[in-house]
Amino acid sequence: MNLDYLKEYDYVVVMGHRNPDMDSIVSSILVRDILRSFGVKSDFAVIKNSNSFDSNIKNMNDLIDEKPLEISAEEIGEYKFFLVDHNDVNQSIKKSNLVVGCIDHHLSSGKIDYYYKDLGACALVIYDLFKDKYDFSQKHKKLIYFAFLSDTNFGKSSRYSISDERLVKELGYNTNYDNHFKKYFKETKISENNFKESGFKVIDINGIEFESSFLNVVNKEDKKEKYINFVKESNCNYIGLWYDFGEECTFTYVKLAGELLVLKYDFIASRAMDIIPDVQKIIKDRKMIT
């Protein structure tokens, strides 16, 4: 990926999706630093008043010791943006004409052109793309590793692949993640606010819009009914994920056209690669494509 064309811009802001998780923040920092090394004035940013640093890593704030620029909705039109960890502008700035570049590991929304590679974390995509052109520091590599742990749920996600394992070894880390899981995994607190905000995204599937969130829990079976009721009572189409790391399974509650559907996976399922395609199939089978 040649970044020389970005030199025509006075200033480029790097931004992940709204309510950024660790992968989104780390990816933003990496691309900002890479752009600066290419002579492009750049900062990383978040949308003001979004829930920043939504993570399943206990010490995320200790690992990331700098704060992003905060941009209000009214200020968005004043900037040019390089997007990371999402390629759907509805998840961040809303306006595709402001996008000057994008790197992501999610399938295309069809809204913008972007560089894509199927890896467990966007930070790994950025490392793999630029490792021969940019000298990643040890701090960068540690951030990439923890972004990977976060986005693959410590290697437990169905999305984890041999390609991820190879890059983790390149970074200099062991691929046995159990000790890190025991030390760093952070459960989602069971609360109405987290029902709404944890892992929150707005997702367009075949022209039908869904809100979506997920909870990371360990053996909280007695609390599950509260989350199911939250999904049932939502006033929109909804995809709610209950990740049970005690049983290593995923319950997905899909509210579609007022009906609640339950999808069960006997593994930690990827929202992007497992669940959204299954919901897409349901929509097609019911001939609900708009």
Image (spheres, helix red, strand yellow):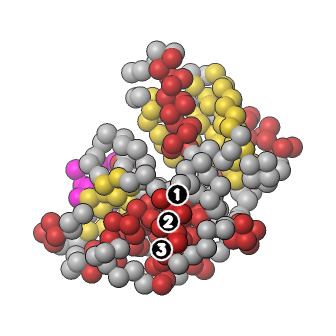
- Furthest residue in direction right, as rendered: 222
Residue in the picture at 52% in, 72% down: 169
Point out which mark residue 162 bears.
Answer: 1
Q: Which element is circle 3 on?
A: helix
Residue 267 horizontal side relative to residue 44, left or right:
right
Q: Position of residue 13 (x, y in %)?
A: 31, 67
Work out how far the residue at label 2 is from the one at label 1, CA to CA, in angstroms. 6 Å
Residue that carries the numbered disc 2 in the rendered image = 166
Tell me, yes or no, whether the two marked residues, 3 and 2, touch with CB atoms within 8 Å.
Answer: yes
Closer-to-camera residue (7/197): 7
Residue in the picture at 64% in, 62% down: 154
Q: Name above or below for residue 165 compared with residue 228.
A: below
Closer-to-camera residue (145/36): 145
Residue in the picture at 69% in, 71% down: 180
Q: Residues within 10 Å of mark 1 (few under 14, many from 20)?
A: few
Q: Which element is circle 2 on?
A: helix
Tell me, yes or no, whether the two marked residues, 2 and 1, touch with CB atoms within 8 Å.
Answer: yes
Q: Name above or below for residue 220 compared with residue 181.
A: above
Q: Which element is circle 1 on?
A: helix
Work out how far the residue at label 3 is from the one at label 2, CA to CA, in angstroms. 6 Å
Work out how far the residue at label 1 is from the one at label 3, CA to CA, in angstroms. 12 Å
Closer-to-camera residue (78/182): 182
The C terminus - image quarter: top left
Residue that carries the numbered disc 3 in the rendered image = 170
